[in-house]
Amino acid sequence: MEMKEIMLRLTAHETLSREEAKNVLLRITKGEFNNSLVASFLTVFMMRNITVDELAGFRDAMLELCLQVDLSDFNTIDLCGTGGDGKHSINISTLASFVVAGAGEKVAKHGNYGVSSACGSSNIMEYYGYKFTNNRDELLKQIENAGICFLHAPLFHPAMKNIAPIRKELGLKTFFNMLGPLINPSFPGNQLTGVFNLETARLFNYIYQGTEKNFSIVYSLDGYDEISLTSDFKIISNHEEQLLSPEQAGFTQITPEDILGGKTVKESAEIFLRILEGEGTDAWNDVITINAGLALKCICQNKTQDECIEIANESLRSGKALKAFSRVLS
């Protein structure tokens, strides 16, 4: 099926089957269509909700094409948000990843450069001299020594090279933002995923239910793709759904201004290090602690949510998270 025919169907409000979605994305990654057609295709899914079959098909294509890496020697977790919430907050999931590693768990963090924000996890790590790699031995060594490694998406998804310039030019959230947490090339057994609305949370829930992962999907009702403590928030896991206020989780509600990140990579990286070094504000520390705590709860099924939040708090405030950061850079 040619892209023109696909676009005619989509603009007539039809949807794609799982197999059709997979096939069209495989062809896009091979560079079979010009940039204008690809940009138009991406735009369709900015204007209407993506279906479960479409998202699953796109995920199937990306996993078929990716360079897989076996980290199953460890029981790993990935903390990865969809991005694209436009909130320009501090790098919460990346900081929380180091808190989890500092608490003794193993993290295989899937990430990339910022697309719709000033600074993604890869920007932060690159700023501090982390060398991205897809060498399994090196990644295993990092997990063993620091409790964490970073899977820089372009090194594991080389087929994305034809799409990356188009995404960058658009500078808007596309369904590729949604795919990030679904296509970790190491297939971790545990996943904390942040999404920016209820519809996306439900899509992810359907897809994760078809896997053997322990998972938690979180979003804040005011549109953050993580628990921001700026509003009530939802948690959907293998076992239950919760709707909580910050106070019910043991925290004080804050404002969006309290967790604004830097406007440049340099500013964002400086804030990042200040937090790990114990110089963060209460708001910064709290929002990182609760997200890390829920990640720990995802991987430590025998502990309570409150226990996991306390373990996360101790990891951040004692300097264990900073130690994990220092070790992964060495």
Image: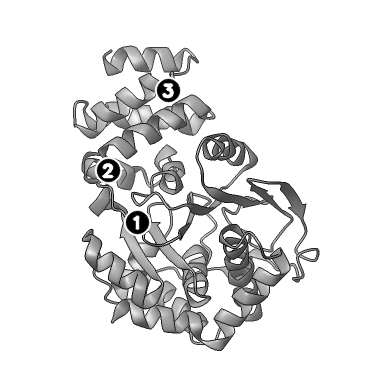
What residue is disc 1 on?
112
Residue at 24% from the left image edge and 60% from the top image edge: 136
The quarter in which the N terminus is drawn is top left
Report, in whole angstroms, how far the alpha carbon at label 2 lies from the one at label 1: 15 Å
Answer with mark 3 or mark 1, whichever residue precedes in sequence: 3
Answer with mark 2 or mark 3, whichever residue precedes in sequence: 3
Foreground tag (2 vs 1): 2
Q: Amino acid at mark 3?
A: Arg
Circle 1 Cα neighbour tier, 10 Å, few/some/many (<14 / 14–19 / ≥20)? many
Q: Which mark is residue 18?
A: 3
Residue 253 in which image quadrant: bottom right
The percent coordinates of residue 38 (x first, y second) are 30, 30
Q: Which mark is residue 66?
A: 2
Residue 266 in which image quadrant: bottom left
For label 3, the SS is helix
The quarter in which the C terminus is drawn is bottom left
Do tag 3 and tag 1 residues touch (Cβ < 8 Å)?
no
Circle 3 Cα neighbour tier, 10 Å, few/some/many (<14 / 14–19 / ≥20)? some
Report, in whole angstroms, how far the alpha carbon at label 3 lies from the one at label 1: 26 Å
Residue at 69% from the left image edge and 62% from the top image edge: 230
Answer with mark 2 or mark 1, whichever residue precedes in sequence: 2
